[in-house]
Every structure is written in structure tokens, then in C-alpha cells.
Image (cartoon, rainbow, N blue to C red):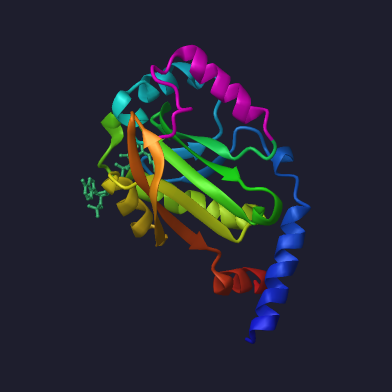
Amino acid sequence: MVLATRLAILGSLLQRTNRVNIGAMKKNRVIFDGGDFLIRDFIRDDAESLALSGNDREVWLCLRDRFPSPYTRRDALDWIDLVNNSNPKINFAIDVEGRVAGGIGLMLQTDVARVSAEIGYWLGKEYWGKGIMTKAVSGMSEWAFCNLPITRLYALVFDFNKSSARVLEKCGYQLEGRLRKAAIKDGKVVDELLYAKIRDELSTEAKLQS
Ligand SMILES: CC(C)(COP(=O)(O)OP(=O)(O)OC[C@H]1O[C@@H](n2cnc3c(N)ncnc32)[C@H](O)[C@@H]1OP(=O)(O)O)[C@@H](O)C(=O)NCCC(=O)NCCS
């Protein structure tokens, strides 16, 4: 199919998805079932397990400074209220056996970058190394491209965070560049790696034709 036709199809999908009121969708959705975990909406009863998983300096060291450290029950409740009052709801709990093991979410960009969203994620340390986040980022990316009017997902990773970079690579994100000395974390200036995944035009066409 010629490029112009592909772009026309993508344009019509973006117009359609722009009209969807995602906030009006079902409450407490499960948006992805990973088998041994779920990606679902947060509820207020999650506060305790969220604070327990999040209250870890090793987790904080890999994230932006706005992630609380220490992470209290009050911080957890504030976060749950914030995400549940946002529209669209695009931040979710990673649930293992009914407890919050971590979080995954999107930051929609604005103005001319409104077709882009940043993906962010974390897990409590006891859940690391079990393949959870590879499945979660993959499921969340698919959900985002199917439900939001975006063409691009990207992630910024501190260059020392090998496991996060590996997760993104396994999920089909491409390394686009190294942002030299772009951030300061725990008093040290660090490079950030920019990874991105673009909406697959072929699968978009297939969905539109089915
Ligand atoms: C990064 C994080 C999300 C990874 O989650 P996870 O569920 O443990 O990841 P997975 O088990 O799915 O995959 C991890 C991969 O990294 C690899 N890995 C782990 N440590 C590594 C290292 N030091 N060097 C290279 N690869 C490494 C693992 O071997 C695995 O790859 P493989 O399947 O090819 O063997 C988790 O460690 C975390 O929450 N860290 C703190 C917060 C954070 O870093 N968030 C991301 C900010 S960009």
C-alpha cells in the first residue's frame, strides 16, 4: 500500500481515538493479564502494599526525584487519588496476588508532541528478575497504541540502569540516542538513554480492516 494511503488510514484512526472518552470507561479496569500478575487501576485499599513496595532507596535511585523516598502510606494515598482523578486514567498498579508490586504509566505530551507519550515503570525489589516488567511493558505498550491517539512511546533511562534498558529492548523499543549529562540523580550527573517504539502501521491497518 502506498505511503499516502497508510497515512490517511492512520489519520482516521487518530481522529476516531481522539473522540474516545477514556475516562468514561469501566472503573477498576484490568488492562492486561500477564498470567502471574495484572495491570489494573489503583484502588484506595492499595495504599499499604503500594507504600511497602515503593519504600526502597534502590528503586528511588532509578527514578525521578518526585518518586517519594521514604514512601509513606500518605504518599501512596495521594498518588492513588491523583491518578484516579485524572482523565484519561493512564497510570496503573502491577498486581501480584492482590498486592501492589509496582506501577506502570504514561505521561502524555502536549502541543506538537501530543502524539507522543513517555512510559514509566517500577517494581518493588522482591519482584525483580522474574520477567514481570518485560511482559508488563509489552502489554502496556500494546494497550496504549490501541486506546490512545499516539504514534510514539518513549522512555528515558539512566545509563547505569542495565535491566531497564534490557526490558525496553526485549519489548521492541529502539535506542535512539544518549542524552549526555542530561540528569542529576543522588548528586551525580548522568547520561540518559532515549528508547522509543513507534505505532506499527501494518498492524494498525490489519485492525482497521478486521
Ligand atoms: C528495571 C526493572 C523495572 C526491571 O524489571 P524486571 O521485572 O526485573 O525485568 P525482567 O525480569 O522482565 O527483565 C530484566 C532483564 O534485565 C536483565 N538484567 C538484569 N540486570 C542486568 C545487568 N546488570 N546488565 C544487563 N542486563 C541485566 C535480566 O537478565 C533480564 O534480561 P533477560 O531476560 O534477557 O535475561 C526493575 O528492576 C525496577 O523496577 N527497577 C527500579 C525502577 C526502575 O529502574 N524503573 C525503570 C526506570 S527507567
Say whether residue 67 is magenta.
Answer: yes
Q: Quadrant of ligand 1?
A: top left
Q: Is residue 10 above or below residue 27?
A: below
Q: Position of residue 134 (x, y in %)?
A: 36, 50
Judge by depth and name the residue closer to the eye, 159 or 183: 183
Q: Is residue 119 above or below residue 145?
A: above
Q: Position of residue 82 (x, y in %)?
A: 62, 26
Q: Point out the stretch of residues depicted in magenta.
A: 63-86
Judge by depth and name the residue closer to the eye, 198 or 187: 187
Say whether residue 85 is magenta.
Answer: yes
Q: Position of residue 85 (x, y in %)?
A: 68, 28
Name the residue at 64% across, 54% down. Answer: 113
Q: Is residue 104 above or below residue 110?
A: above
The C terminus lies in which quarter of the figure? bottom right
Name the residue at 36% across, 40% down. Answer: 36
- In the image: residue 117, left or right of residue 85: left
